[in-house]
Amino acid sequence: NAGVTQTPKFQVLKTGQSMTLQCAQDMNHEYMSWYRQDPGMGLRLIHYSVGAGITDQGEVPNGYNVSRSTTEDFPLRLLSAAPSQTSVYFCASSGSRDVNYEQYFGPGTRLTVT
Amino acid sequence: SQKIEQNSEALNIQEGKTATLTCNYTNYSPAYLQWYRQDPGRGPVFLLLIRENEKEKRKERLKVTFDTTLKQSLFHITASQPADSATYLCALGREYYGNNRLAFGKGNQVVVIP
């Protein structure tokens, strides 16, 4: 199992550009989430999904869109990048039958917006 | 609003000693609490879960306590080793519309000195 994979690992964008961060998992997990991690802020939930076709907003959803057309993939779209979106982005997945509610995190995407 | 506090100062500890980290929270009633380990440039990795009706949990050299009256969890690493050097995150969880949503603390760095 590859677990949770994310691409790209690093990205530099100019203000106003759009891009998609990719996330995939091969564990057949129902739940998938996107977090951002900023120095001194901890991990904050952006969007999450409880299954294919179902998504909802987290704590800091503005400026981001998600969709979940398959169980495996959960891409995060930045519509018009802003310097405030400079951060490290983590995708995570978890299974509904996991008694520990363990979240499996990807390696992260480090995004810089200039 | 909910608040999760972890010590922002790094804990420097001699190899072989017990490292103890604290996670305090307010305005929150978690069903469970998790601890994750994060190494630089990597995603968090799940370590332990403790439920609201449990007082203590152990896993190898790790011990977690959970006091819902004090709204506090303590995380202990016994016989610490240099390989335990990392940042440790606490996360509070509860079910939210079919998903288990987590709220993370900012993390506490541990440095084990040989």
Image (cartoon, rainbow, N blue to C red):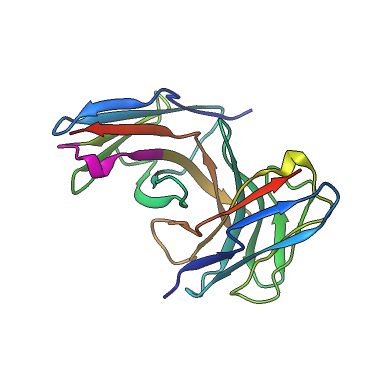
Image point 44% across, 56% down: which residue?
A101
For the point 80% across and 43% down, the residue is: A82
Relative horizontal placement of residue A60, taking residue B104 as reference (left or right): right
Per the image, is B86 magenta? yes
Q: Quadrant of residue B85?
A: top left
Q: Quadrant of residue A31?
A: bottom right
Pick the residue in front: B47 or A2.
Answer: A2
Q: Position of residue B20 (x, y in %)?
A: 27, 29
A48 or B17: which is nearer to us?
Answer: B17
**Residue A110's x, y, as percent?**
60, 50
Q: Is residue B68 magenta?
A: no
Is A96 on the left-hand or right-hand side of B113? right
Residue A60: where, in percent of width, then height?
Answer: 71, 43
Q: Is residue B57 visible?
A: no
* Residue A10 seen by the camera: yes
Residue at (63%, 72%) from the top-left corner?
Answer: A73
A46 versus A39 height, above or below: below
Magenta region: B78-88
Q: Quadrant of the N terminus of chain A?
A: bottom left
Query: Which one is nearer the viewer's eye here, A12 or B15?
Result: A12
Residue B95's x, y, as percent? Answer: 55, 51
